[in-house]
Image (spheres, rainbow, N blue to C red):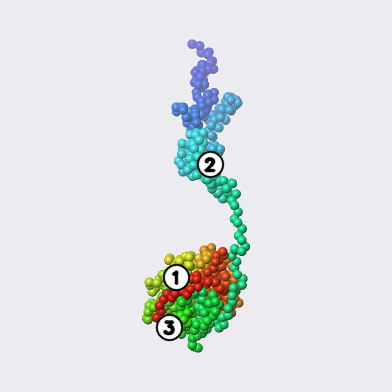
Amino acid sequence: MNFNTPVKSRRSAHCTPRQSRLDSSPLTPRHYGQLSSSFIGSRRNSPKTSIHKQIGSPLRLDTYLPETTLVGTGPSSAANTPKRVAKKQLFRSSVQADRFIPSRNSSSTTMSKLEGDNGRANASSCSTSSGSIASNSYDYQSSVAEACGFALNQRILAFKPEAPQSKKPIDLRSQYNRPLKPAVNAQLRRRLPTNAERILDAPGIRDDYYLNLLDWSCNNQVAIGLDRDLYVWNAESGTVSSLLRTTPDTYISGLKWSGDGAYVAVGLSDGDVQIWDVEEGEKVRSMAGHAARVGVMSWDRHILSSGCRDGSIWNHDVRIAQHKVSEYVNHEAEVCGLQWRSDGSQLASGGNDNLVNIWDARSSTPKFTKTNHKAAVKALAWCPWQMNLLATGGGTFDKQIHFWNGTTGARVNTIDAGSQVTSLQWSTSYKEIVSSHGYPDNNLSIWSYPTLVKNGEIQGHDTRILGSALSPDGSTLATVASDENLKFWKVFEQIGKKVSSAVMGGSLASGGKDIAKVMMIR
């Protein structure tokens, strides 16, 4: 045995296998680059790295070490090489870009508005590919836009929508080559009068808003009550005759012509109602019973309705001795307006209690009661060309003209006249209505219906107009005022038509013959 062998050589002999084992250990710095490169490759091909690379390839199960095994403390010359640095940067970028972030170019405001809940439900399917997302979203937008009826390049919300285009082709030649309307001859234009056709004196007329002292018959005769006297003016011959004179303690408070124009009913301040034959010039009968003055009356064939100051309305049958057949009671003040409808089915009444009542002829209770007026209602008029239309006018504190549907009771229109309304007259030739006024304007106003446009006004009297009456042909309006003047106005002159009866001269529709009396009064 050789005991002179140095220890160093013995140690080196024993350390060689150990050194080889250390060199082959995975924890040595020499193998760190290889392990990190293989790990980076496995991370690059892992399912979490890229969804796009997973499509079309089987799942690859790569083994990799945890992060604690990748941390080294020993020096390594390979770690400082450019290739080594590039691999580390690639590793960091792959780890940071692990989430899928969609492109902004594929998302738009229009897409979000159109997709709605369906787009959120298909979010998982749309994340497979950016190209498939764009195609699917465009198809979906197209189908929704087609269903909603607008184009994709059109805004859903706009300040002003475009006007719809006509489906029919527009023929510009026929549209712009229309013949012009012929000019209306100046002689055929309707003009409102500025001066009265005729003026008559009315001395001694009572300046009382609640009285009705003027009426025009179908025989073209005008009756007017001047205090105690009743005068009849014949518009054909221009003659004036005195029909009656009351006792000194009474006065005429109301009058109304019968439908055939042969009789005139006269209401007196003592409550008496008299019927006079104008042709014979004598009183036919007297009907007493009212407790106060009778200021308004209205005929419906053989039925004469009279309104009293105590608020009652009596219906008289002039053919029988017991004349009172019914009584209407619903007003708490004087009845100053009363008019039957042309067919006799309804009676309208107005009073100083600001009420308007519409009565059914078969009932003693009002069908409708209207409280819209704020003052006394004297002016009442049923429309001749729309049978169920009623116009009512209020006094000084109201100044309104209301239009009512007599069938339903609804108010259909209203005019603010601006003055006290004393009377209303519908035109039979035009769709117009004329109103006479008191304080403060004292004028006549002509209104179109249903447009309610004021066609004009006439300043005719110095004081308030008390009442008005329309001629049988519907062309001339007679007005009487507290200035003691009776004036005639051509407010509804019929242009191009021959008037059958006129204020000054002319003939009646009957050809000048006397109209037969259609009622037998006892």
Marker disc for residue 341: 1
Q: Which circle, 3 or 2, is nearer the viewer?
A: 3
The answer to whether residue 430 is left or right of residue 291 is right
Q: To which residue does mark 3 refer? A: 286
What whole-number distance in Å separates the C-alpha atoms at marks 3 and 2?
88 Å
Q: Secondary structure at mark 3?
A: strand
What whole-number distance in Å separates the C-alpha atoms at marks 3 and 1?
25 Å
Three-letter code for the amino acid on which mark 1 is drawn:
Arg
Three-letter code for the amino acid on which mark 3 is drawn:
Ser
The residue lying at 58 percent from left, 28 percent from top is 86
Whether tag 3 and tag 1 are in contact, CB under 8 A, the answer is no
Q: Quadrant of the C terminus?
A: bottom left
Q: Quick check: 181 above or below 198?
A: above
- How dense is the environment of label 3, judged by Cα within 10 Å: few (below 14), some, or many (20 and up)? some
Q: Position of residue 223 (x, y in %)?
A: 51, 78
Mark earlier in primary sequence (3, 2): 2
The residue lying at 54 percent from left, 72 percent from top is 506
Give the quarter of the image for residue 364. Answer: bottom left
What whole-number distance in Å separates the C-alpha atoms at marks 2 and 1?
63 Å
Q: To which residue does mark 2 refer? A: 152
Whether tag 2 and tag 1 are in contact, CB under 8 A, the answer is no
Marker disc for residue 349: none
Q: Position of residue 452 (x, y in %)?
A: 54, 65
Q: Which circle, 3 or 1, is nearer the viewer?
A: 3
